[in-house]
Amino acid sequence: MDDKLGLPYWAIGTALALGSTLLIGDPYIVSVVNLISIAALTAVSLRFVMLIGELNFATAAFVGIGAYTAGAAVTILDWPFLVAILLAGVVAAAVSALFGFVTLKTKGPYFLLISFAFTEAVRIVYSKSMFLGGNSGMVGIFPPLALDPWMPTFIMAVSAALIFALYAAERSDFGKILIAIRDNENVARTVGLNILLIKVACFALASFAAGIAGSLHAFANSVISPGDFSYLLAAFALAYVKVGGEDSILGPIIGAVLLVSLGSYALGLGGQEHIFYGAAIVLVVLLMPHGLVGLVRRGRDKLAQRRA
Amino acid sequence: MTGERQALLQARGLTRRFGGLVAVSNLDFDIHPGEILGLIGPNGAGKSTTFNLISGFYKPTSGELTIFGEPCTGKSSMAISRMGLVRTFQHGSFMPTMSVADNILLGTIHGLRDRAARRDRVVETAQMLGLGGHLSDIAGTLPHGLQRLVSIGIAFAARPKLLCLDEPLTGLNQTEVTGTLTMLERIRDEFGASILLVEHNMKAVMKVCDRIVVLHHGQFLAEGTPGEIHSNRKVIDAYLGHRHEK
C-alpha cells in the first residue's frame, strides 16, 4: 500500500527532459527528441494495457485515429490546435471504449489477434478514404506559427504529463485492480468488481494517451499517411517496453530513448534501423528478461547484499 | 432447522448438467444466519459445482436460488458478490505478484469508497488473520499456509454476509488448521457472518461446523449436526465407511 508517487524524481526528470528540448539547436536532433517523446508515450500506453495482462496491438490504431482526428480537425474543419489535440484523445478513447467493450471479453492470443486485425483494418480504411487523403495521407498539419519554435518542448511537456497521469493511475487503487485482473481475474470478480468495465476503462485511458501521441506525431511531422500506423508501430512500442523493462513505467521510457536514438543513428548510416530493434529484442529476451530497469535493480540489490 | 424465511441462502431443485453428465441433481439446502455449514462429499460429489452455482460462476440448468431473500437464479458472479456472498477458490485464490496488503485491499474496494477507510479495513483484516507482520510481503513468496490466509483475507475484507470457502485447510499443518478454525469461529461470532465450508478434512469439519450437508453423486444425501452426520448410516456407507469401521 505504498502510495508515494515519487514526485521530486518526476519533477527533476521532467525538468531535465524539458530543458533538453530548449538547449538542443540541431533540427535533426530536435526531430529525434520529438520522436522519443511520442514513442515513450505510445509505449507507456501499450504497457498500461499490459497491466491487465493483454498485449494491445490496437495501440497503433489509436495513435493513427488520434493523428487523423487532429489532422482532419485542423486541415478540414479548421478547428484550433489545442481543441484538435484534445479531440484526438477523446475520439481515440471513445472508439477504444466501444472496441474494448466488444473485444475485451476475449483474452491472450485471441485479443492480440483481434487488436492486430483492427489496426490493419483501420489502416486500410484511411487508405480508402479520399477525404483523408487516401494512400498519400494528409498534409499541412501545422501547429500555430507562434508555437512552432516551442513544439519540441510542448510535445515533451504533454507526453510527460500524460505519462505521469498513467503512472498515478497505476499507483492508485484502480491500478491495483488492473494488476489483480492480470494475476487472477476470477478472484477480482468474487469481490464485486466489474471486470469488463474496469478493463474498458483501462483500455480507454491508454487509448486517450495513444490518441494524443498520434496528434503530437501529426503536428510534429505535418504529414501523416496510413503506412505510419501499421502494426509495426505497436511492435516498436513493444520493443521499447521489453528492452526497458515492463515491471516499471521507467522501462518504456528508457527503451524509447535507447532504441529511437540507436534507430536514428542507424538511419544516418544508411537505414536498416530495424536491425537494432530485432537484435535488441532478441538480446533482452535472452539476457535480461526484466529489461534494462530490471538489470539495474538486480545490480543494486546485489550491491546492497554485499554491503550488508 | 429454522424456517425458510430466515435462510440466507435457499437452493431448491438446483441442477447442473454438463452434456450427459449431471454434476448436481435436484439439490435442496439452506444456509442460516450465523452458522458454519459444512458441505461435504466424496470426490466428484458435486461440491465444487454447487459452489460455482451459488456464487454465479455457473448458471443452473434448472432449479431456484434465493440469496438474502432475493431470487438469484442465473445472476452474475459480480451481482451475487455485491449482495454479500463472497467465495474463495480451491487453488491460488490470491494475487501472487501483489503484496499481502494490496491483496486484502481488493476485497475492500467495492464496499468502501474512502481510501483511508479501505486501509483501516486492510490492517484490521490482516491483524484478525495473523497477517499483520506480512503486509508488505509479496503474496507469491509466502509459505502455503499464509497464502491460504491471504485468500480468506481478500474475501473477508469485503465483510460478506456469507463467506464461502473452498477447501481452505488443504495443505495446512495441524497448528495452522487449528488457527484457521479459531479464526472462522471469530468471523462468525464477532462479525456475524455465516460460512459455507467445503472441506475434505473431516476432523476439522466435525469440529467447526454447526450443521453439515452431505452430497453424493451430485445429489443430496443427508443433513444434520456433526453428531448426526457422524452416525448417519447413509453417510457412513457412502463416505465415512472405512474410517468409521476402524
Image (cartoon, rainbow, N blue to C red):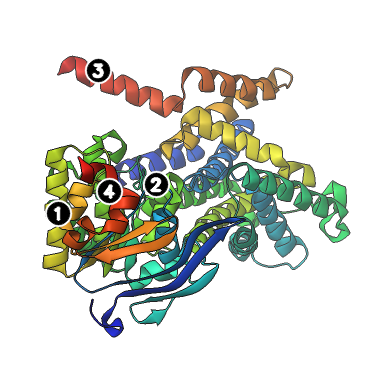
For marks 4 and 1, the one nearer the N-term is 1
Q: Are marks 4 and 2 on the same chain?
A: yes
When the figure is inspected, residue B166 is found, relative to residue B61, above or below; the finding is: above
Residue A3 showing in the rendered view: no
Label 3 sits on a secondary structure element that is helix
Q: Residue at x 58, y 39 (%)?
A: A39
Q: Are marks 2 and 1 on the same chain?
A: yes
Report the front residue among A103 and B236: B236
Residue to which mark 4 is pinned:
B240
Return the chain for callout 2: B
Give the Cα separation between the discs numbered 3 and 1.
Answer: 52 Å
Give the Cα separation between the discs numbered 3 and 4.
Answer: 58 Å
When the figure is inspected, residue B206 is found, relative to residue A257, above or below; the finding is: below
Which quadrant holds the C terminus of chain A?
top left
Return the chain for callout 4: B
For marks 4 and 2, the one nearer the N-term is 2
Residue A5 showing in the rendered view: yes
Residue to which mark 2 is pinned:
B43
Give the Cα separation between the discs numbered 3 and 2.
Answer: 51 Å
Q: Are marks 3 and 1 on the same chain?
A: no
For marks 4 and 1, give the one nearer the viewer: 4
Q: For residue B118, which numbered disc appears in the image?
A: none
In the displayed structure image, the side of residue A193 where residue B62 appears, left or right:
right
Q: For residue B207, which numbered disc appears in the image?
A: 1
The image shows residue A131 at horizontal and vertical percentages of: 85, 61
Residue to which mark 3 is pinned:
A303
Which residue type does callout 3 highlight? Leu
Give the Cα separation between the discs numbered 2 and 1.
Answer: 21 Å
